[in-house]
Image (cartoon, grey):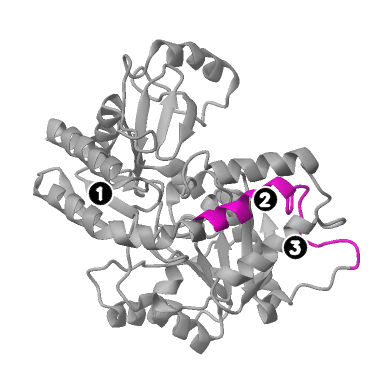
Amino acid sequence: MSEDDPLERLSGAVPGPRTAEHIPALRAYESQNVTHLADDFPVFWESARGATVVDVDGNRYLDLTAAFGVANVGHANPRVTAAVADQAERLMHGMGDVHPTAVRARLLERLAQILPPGLKKTFLATTGSEAVEAALKTATLATGRSRFASYRGAYHGLSLGALTVCGIDKFREPFAPALGQRALLLDYPGSDETADGAIARTRAELTGHTDVAALLIEPIQGRAGCIVPPPGYLSAVRALCDDLGILMIVDEIYTGFGRTGTWFAVDREGVLPDIICIGKAMGSGFPISAAVGRAEVMDAWPLSNGEALHTSTYLGNPMGCAAALATIGELARRHLPARAAALEPFLRSRLNALTSRRVVVGVRGRGLLWGVQLANPGVAAATVKRALRAGLILLQSGAAGDVIAITPPLVITERQLARAVEILEAAIDAIE
C-alpha cells in the first residue's frame, strides 16, 4: 500500500477514550444546538490528508464527505497549504474595500477565466450564505423588485437573508417572524421527469407573480439529498427566466469546482446564469466564497465613492485568495473535474447494486456527488454510525435525513473508493 493510497486503520474503539475526554468541554462551553453528542458519535478529528482523516485516538478513516464537499483537491493539499503559509508570512489580512491586495486582483482575474464566459464581476465573501445574500441584494438593485423564487428542498445557508429562500422548513420555521416575505417555493423536478413537463410546471408556478426579482436554483440539490433534475431542465429555466424578465441565480456552492465532472455543473448544459454563487471547495478549507455575475447585472451597484454598500472585514482576505488560487491550480494541474467524471461510472455501478437491499430506496447522482436514499432517517443514522465504527466517514443528508451523501475528495484513489463502498455495503447489510 502506497503512502498516497492509505486505507482505514483502527487502533482501538470508535469513538475512543481521547474523544470521550473532549466531550465535556463541548457540553459545557458550546451552544447545545451545534454538535450532537452521544456515546457512539462523533469522533474528534486530529488531522487529515488526501482522502483520509485521523482522529485524536489515532484511528484512520476513509472520508466520503470531503468535509461537507470542501476538500475537493484533498485534505491538507501540499500546494494549497504551502500557498497559505507563504501568504501568512507576508500578509495575513488586508483592508477589504479600502486597500486591496495584489493576490485579490489575481484571484478575480482567474475566476473570470474558469467560470462560464460572461461571468466576470465578483463580490468576494467568506461563507456560502454571505455569497447568496450578495446575489439577492444584487438582483434587488438590478430589477427594482424584492421577492425571489426558489425550490422546495433548497438549502442556501442559514443566515437570516439566506433563510428567506430556504426550502427546508425545519431550518426556517423557528425564525419565521424575523424573516418577512418568504420566497415563492417551486417544485424541484427529479430525474424521472422530462424537462418539458418540469418546465411547464415551473412556468405555471411563476405565472402571475410579477414581483419576482430572481429565481435561485441549485443545479443539483445537495442538502435535500442529491436531487438531480432531468437533462435540459437548467437550459429550460434559463430560457424561462429570459422570457419572464427575471434573473437566474445558480447556487454552485456545493456542485462547483469539479464536483460533478465539469468545472461547474452549469457547464454540462452550457447555461450562463446571471449570477453564480461559489464557495466550499473554493478555498480547500480556508473560508472564502463569491457571487459572480454578468457585468450589466453587477453594475447595478453604484460606483464606490469610498463607502461600500456591501462589504465585510474579511472581504478578499489574502490567505483565502491564496488558497483559492492554489486550489484552482491543483484542479487544473491534476485534471480533477475530468477525474470526477471518469470515476462516475464505477461509483454509479457500485451504488446502484445497493438497490437490491430492502432498506435502499434509490440512488442518484453525478460525478462524485451521490445520494443513497434509505428507508427512513433511523436507518440512515444507523448506517452512518456503523460505518464510522468500521473506519468510514459518511454524512447523513436529505430534507428528512433519510439519505447518505457520497462526496469524496476528487483525489480519492480507485482503491480507496472501492474499499469505502465495501464498508458502506457491509454497514447496510448488517442493518438489513
Quadrant of image for the N terminus:
top left
Q: Is residue 104 visible?
A: yes
Q: Is residue 270 left or right of residue 424?
A: right
Residue stretch in magenta: 305-330
Question: Is 310 in the magenta?
Answer: yes
Q: CA distance from mark 1 to mark 3?
A: 41 Å
Residue beneath the point at 74% across and 53% down: 315
Dot 2 corresponds to which residue?
322
Which amino acid is tagged 2? Ala
Question: Is 143 in the magenta?
Answer: no
Compared to 178, does 6 lie above or below? above
Q: Is residue 73 left or right of residue 361?
A: right
| Disc 2 element | helix
Q: Earlier in the sequence, mark 2 or mark 3?
A: 3
* Residue 372 - label: 1
Compared to 19, does 76 lie above or below? below
| Disc 3 element | helix
Residue beneath the point at 10% across and 44% down: 357
- Front residue of 372 and 268: 268
Q: How many marks?
A: 3
Q: CA distance from mark 2 to mark 1?
A: 35 Å
Which amino acid is tagged 3? Ala
Q: Residue furthest right?
A: 306
* Residue 105 - label: 3
Question: Quarter-wise, where is residue 352 in the image?
Answer: bottom left
- Front residue of 208 and 312: 312
Q: Earlier in the sequence, mark 1 or mark 3?
A: 3
